[in-house]
Amino acid sequence: MPAYKYVHDVMLRDCEPSGIVFLPRYFDMVHNVIENWLDEALDWPMSQLQGSDGLSLPFVDIRAEFPAPSRLGDRLTWRLTVRDIGRSSMWLEVVGTTGAETRASINGTLVLTEALALRTRRWPEAMTERLKDYLIPSEGKANKVAE
Amino acid sequence: MPAYKYVHDVMLRDCEPSGIVFLPRYFDMVHNVIENWLDEALDWPMSQLQGSDGLSLPFVDIRAEFPAPSRLGDRLTWRLTVRDIGRSSMWLEVVGTTGAETRASINGTLVLTEALALRTRRWPEAMTERLKDYLIPSEGKANKVAE
Amino acid sequence: MPAYKYVHDVMLRDCEPSGIVFLPRYFDMVHNVIENWLDEALDWPMSQLQGSDGLSLPFVDIRAEFPAPSRLGDRLTWRLTVRDIGRSSMWLEVVGTTGAETRASINGTLVLTEALALRTRRWPEAMTERLKDYLIPSEGKANKVAE
Amino acid sequence: MPAYKYVHDVMLRDCEPSGIVFLPRYFDMVHNVIENWLDEALDWPMSQLQGSDGLSLPFVDIRAEFPAPSRLGDRLTWRLTVRDIGRSSMWLEVVGTTGAETRASINGTLVLTEALALRTRRWPEAMTERLKDYLIPSEGKANKVAE
């Protein structure tokens, strides 16, 4: 199964006074999952990507659904898959569950750019190979990423 | 034009080392815009909504596009409009621009729920009236909110 | 050695555009260390403390030194010790290092209170016993916590 | 009175589930006050300080007291004063009140450094003059900043 898995327990900083996770914190968790995936699975830590490599990897679009709220202490299991790979973009999906319940289902397009100019930049070849390990079969890709 | 306007200057806390706004911070800004709109335009501060009223107003879905990056010191002008109003849900759009350039275009569905149970709750009648001031004309509502 | 240890790699969200950790994020990390210590070492997760137990554990004072900056990708090893235990308060020290270099040295007083009233509350006896495992020898406690 | 004043209403993002402000958020507010002061009072926005000037202004130490908790919707009035000015450092105090009640009293030392090397850097002369407008009389400065 080509999914990268990351476990996060909901902490005080994640929640607001009604006791549920504050929306922006889900995107913070998703970014954390992506950075850990880059480091552990692709051997491309953000400190290298944005440091010696002089690149940046921002989102250009994102869509999310939150079918059920999460609370302090909940254990969220995040699973990351690649939906599509373009010349300099990739379409990622990151889904967070607690037990059988989906709490957040987020997908979006990241583009590789040069850090200063923020011009798109072709994937390094070695990286395209590693990305393919997380690529899911292609049916139903309504959101084909741009070349 | 029925838009609520809120100005935010990009601060250190909003940016990451490549110098651009960190994605989760855009959603933090959007939430800030919504809370200020509830307070200033609808006279329904979050401290009342979640406090004495015992309600909560979470997002159930959200979509966003980021056509161009924002940097430290940029002045973002956010404009909020209501795209549709359901029995207990509303479809909001919040767009952030710097000069003529759109930096973030975000829309999503919020539902009014009881804080503890997180069951949906009908809009108070007075609030539906005030919400309508921010409602834009109805053509092109692909994302009709649920009743 | 009665120290609780927690490792944190510096992520994008921790840093500001000059590339170093943004001050408020150190306090976020420290709170994360404390919550993990409560859960793993004291078997008192925050979801129980603030949930079924109806308590809260806020800081009333804090002091911090930052002898050297931390950067994206740095691995911070945090060590937590208890400097003193009062009737309802405790004086904690949390120090973050990278290799031999101290990056942040933070100590402060937390008080146990009832969540609603925020009145101080005596430590549960079992908890005082567990806390003592992390208590360091008593010389040099300039900052004796209040009873 | 040489104090810079900044008003902040406590928002959802500032609070944790027990309904009070989450400690790290106070430091986030303090940083926001300082950045607004640099921009509005000293005409030295952070985007210039860290951008074209190539400098950085990190804290090297900080002390804080939180005599009473703040809640969602509280209006905090922050007042910033300069306690001392060194060759490349400054000792700031930032106090947040709601009505007659002090909620947070924070003071600490910032040093001006070159962004890359993070070596201390002498204050620009014009800035020292402007800083003096916020300098309070000198009695009782226990924490004389380093030259």
Image (cartoon, coloured by chain):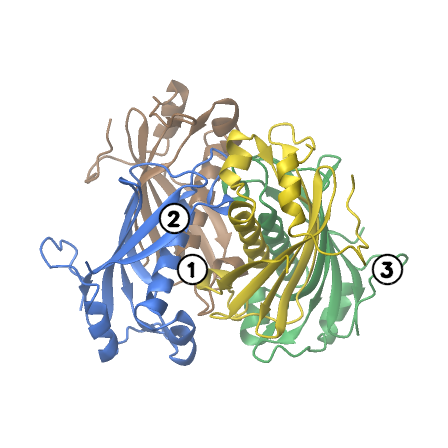
Chain colours: A yellow, B green, C blue, D brown
Q: Disc 3 marks which residue?
A: B141
Which residue lies under the disc numbered 1?
D22
Query: Closer to the observer: label 3 or label 2?
Result: 2
Q: Is residue B6 visible?
A: no
**Same chain? Circles 3 and 2:** no
Which chain letter goes with mark 3? B
Residue at left 50%, top 70%? A74
Circle 3: residue type: Lys
Label disc, if present, on residue C26 of the rendered structure: 2
The residue closer to the viewer here, A61 or A126, is: A126
- Residue B74 versus residue C7 in the image, above or below: above
Tell me the kind of residue under disc 1. Phe
- Chain that bears disc 2: C
Could you give the CA–CA distance between mark 2 and mark 1, rounded to whole angstroms?
Answer: 13 Å
As helix, strand or loop, the secondary structure at mark 1 comes to: loop
**Percent x, y for residue D81?**
35, 39
Q: Quadrant of residue A66?
A: bottom right
In the image, taking residue B86 as reference, residue C54 lies left or right, namely left
